Image (cartoon, rainbow, N blue to C red):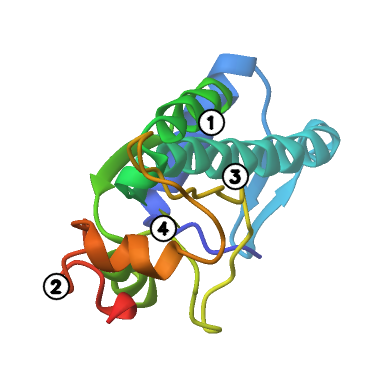
């Protein structure tokens, strides 16, 4: 017998109320308890199915509630600033119930937050620690660009770098480049 976590008088009243609705007796009540009538026996399997369906419905409703509260936190750096909104839009179209939070962060900070579980996805530059899974999305082509009057050949690149001002990455933002 299943426990209903309901007092006996309350349960009896509910059963009697249901018996009035269907205009049939479900139980034969006596000194030694109650037994199902023929109609009670016939309805019992359907009642079990209804209760199982009710449990499935509650589980389904709970899953919908959980999905509605889902949040995906995404980190990205300047290098993929143009691509990330397109990717997010594509994801959002397929999962409109998921709330997305984006954070513009340097790769090193994203990696730390990913490892601490405070960021779900990060678009970072290589290298990535082995403790994180990664997929290479694209390879960049980086070129040395100088004014047209500067002669460039593979033999004078070091000279060009030594004689022209360079932009450098702030070591506080990208300690991996030190």
Q: Is residue 120 left or right of residue 33?
A: left
User: Disc 3 on helix, strand or loop?
Assistant: helix
Query: Disc 1 designates what residue?
Result: 91
- Residue at 35% across, 43% down: 146
Sort mark 2 into few (<14), some (14-19) or many (20+) by Cα contacts within 10 Å: few
- Residue at 76% across, 38% down: 49
| Quarter of the rendering containing residue 59 | top right
Q: Give coordinates of residue 105: x percent, y percent.
A: 24, 54
Asked whether the beta carbons under mark 3 and mark 1 sit within 8 Å of each other, the answer is no
Q: Is residue 89 left or right of residue 164?
A: right
In this view, the mark in front (3 or 4): 4
Asked whether the beta carbons under mark 2 and mark 3 sit within 8 Å of each other, the answer is no
164 or 49: nearer the viewer: 164
Asked whether the beta carbons under mark 1 and mark 4 sit within 8 Å of each other, the answer is no
N-terminal of the two: label 1 or label 2? 1
Q: Quadrant of the C terminus?
A: bottom left
Query: Disc 4 designates what residue?
Result: 120
Q: CA distance from mark 3 to mark 1?
A: 31 Å
Q: Which mark is residue 48?
A: none
Q: Give coordinates of residue 148: x percent, y percent.
A: 38, 33
């Amino acid at each position: 017998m299943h426990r209903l976590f309901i007092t006996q008088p309350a349960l009896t009243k509910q059963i009697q109320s249901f018996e009035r609705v269907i205009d049939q007796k479900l139980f034969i009540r006596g000194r030694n308890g109650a037994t199902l009538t023929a109609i009670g026996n016939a309805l019992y399997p359907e009642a079990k199915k209804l209760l199982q369906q009710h449990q499935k419905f509650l589980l389904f409703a709970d899953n919908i509630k959980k999905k509605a509260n889902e949040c995906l936190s995404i980190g990205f750096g300047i290098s993929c600033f143009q691509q990330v909104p397109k990717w997010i839009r594509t994801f959002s179209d397929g999962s409109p119930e998921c709330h997305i939070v984006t954070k513009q962060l340097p790769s090193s900070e994203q990696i730390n937050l990913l490892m601490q579980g405070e960021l779900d996805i990060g678009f970072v530059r290589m290298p990535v620690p082995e403790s994180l899974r990664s997929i290479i999305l694209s390879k960049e082509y980086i070129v040395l660009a100088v004014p047209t009057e500067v002669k460039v050949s593979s033999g004078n690149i070091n000279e060009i770098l030594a004689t022209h001002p360079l932009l450098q990455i702030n070591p506080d933002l990208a300690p991996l480049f030190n």
